[in-house]
Image: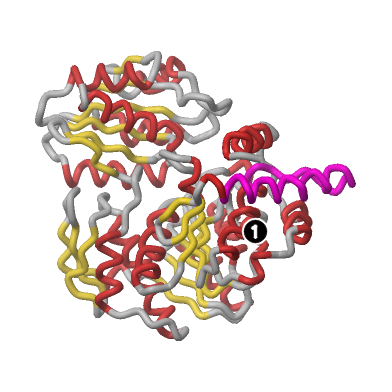
Amino acid sequence: MNYKEARVYLDEVSKYGSVLGLDNMRELLERLGNPQDDLKFIHISGTNGKGSALSYMSTILSGAGLRTGRYISPTLYAYRERIQVDGEMIDRESLAALVTVVKEAVDAMEAEKKGSPTVFEVETALSFLYFKEKKCDIVVLETGLGGTLDATNVVKTTVMEMISSIGMDHMEFLGGTLQEIAENKAGIIKPRTWVVSAEQDPQAAAVIRRVCREKECRLSVVDPDAFQDVHYGYDRQTFSYKDWKDVEITLAGTYQVTNAALALEAVEALRNLGYSLTEEQVRKGMKEAFWRGRFSVIHKNPVVVIDGAHNPAAAKVLKDSLETYFQGKDLHFIFGVFADKDYQSVISMTAPLAKHIITIQTPDNQRALPAEQLRDAVAKVNPSVEAAGSIREAVRKSMENAQKDDVIVAFGSLSFLGELDREVQAMEGE
């Protein structure tokens, strides 16, 4: 199987959707020799901030000389982004070879009526094979959905769990209350490991503390009172946290300071577990960590920001960031979202900030909310709204409408931000 054939196969598998549960995953990995058992993991769950935490940790660990795998989803620019070692994407030949191996195991399972793995399960399995092949010292592993029944939760050799901010999202799968969602996210916690958590809502915090007690885990929590000298900016930000003075990060968004503190708490825990991470390595990793699509400035004059704010908690921090960085500026929004999200809450928080809003339908996804339906929902809060027929049309109209000192903000589903970025860059080259 070559790369093109491998991608066709993965696309075919993806049509079957996703199913929560670990039985198929365990069966598939058993047939592949359980490669995950030969790896060590930092496992990350949470609602918002997982990707940023992964970026900080994997950049620090790679910079410290540890061969570091990273597994992420979704991706914005290239399919192969989801599986990386030391920041390098899996190459096409390796992906094709490993898909061939995994497909044989899947075919055997289906022939024996032992289950049909989902595309996320297939991708997770081949990532474990790749990380083992590359002899990774540690893998930073992001959950796909939830925690307890997420395909990544088959791992048993976890060094540490990180739990980013927990909010209301995917309620149809994870539960209708914050407590139920927290139970699900905390499902990744393994006995006698070290758990590092963001500051949480009291309900979620109580769940995490209880699970840590039951499983005899050490728990470190970000202390909101330990920040000093915080300086925000969309090019660079600095802050002090506990004994860490004047830490510099280039990831933008006011919430990134707290995400960075989560990483610093994880660094201290890893040091206590025997990992050698020097101050210089940590500071360099924090500064170099990069996570495109999370309040990323992709153009200037006018400033264009892309952000994957698709749930109420993410919308709130997006609103805070826009009010902090761009006070007094005219804001133009490009907004697209999935129909199964709580987009009404996202609209109520963000739409009043905009001078004008263009809605789009996220392409090639059955869950996408039609641009016209989203426009009608936005119009109830901000009447200055129109629906665009394509992402290209939305970008061109926004660029025409915006003055040099204005700000264009594209947000909502992560699924359209990569294409939007390419359209912005294409206009720049004209």
**Above or below for 216 versus 297:** below
Q: Is residue 269 above or below residue 296?
A: below
Question: Extreme right residue here?
Answer: 112
- What residue do we see at 48% from left, 76% from top? 219
Q: Position of residue 421 (x, y in %)?
A: 32, 33
Please indicate, yes or no, whether residue 203 appears anywhere in the rendered image. Answer: no
Please, what secondary structure does the residue beneath circle 1 have? loop
Bounds of the magenta segment: 94-120
| Foreground residue among 139 and 411 | 139
Relative side of 373 to 39, left or right: left
Tell me which amino acid carries mark 1.
Thr
* Quadrant of the image containing the N terminus: top right
Task: Name the foreground residue: 214 vs 243.
Answer: 243
Assign the C terminus to one quadrant of the image.
top left
Q: Nearer the viewer, residue 217 or 398?
A: 398
Measuring from the top left, give residue 167's x and y in whole percent.
Answer: 47, 51
Is residue 316 found left or right of 4 in the rendered image? left
Image coordinates for residue 231, horizontal then vertical, percent: 15, 59
On the image, numbered disc 1 is attached to which residue? Answer: 148
Crowdedness near tag 1: few (<14), some (14–19) or many (≥20) residues, C-alpha within 10 Å: many
Inspect this view and state whether residue 419 appears: yes
Q: How many marks?
A: 1
Q: Quadrant of residue 389?
A: top left
Residue at horizontal 50%, vertical 30%? Answer: 338
Q: Is residue 266 magenta?
A: no
Q: Is residue 418 above or below residue 377?
A: below
Picture quarter containing residue 382? top left
Which quadrant of the figure has residue 170? top right
Instruction: From the viewer's perspective, tell me whether residue 308 is left or right of residue 219.
Output: left
x, y percentage for residue 260? 32, 63
Residue drawn at x 46%, y 63% is 202
- Coloring scheme used: secondary structure
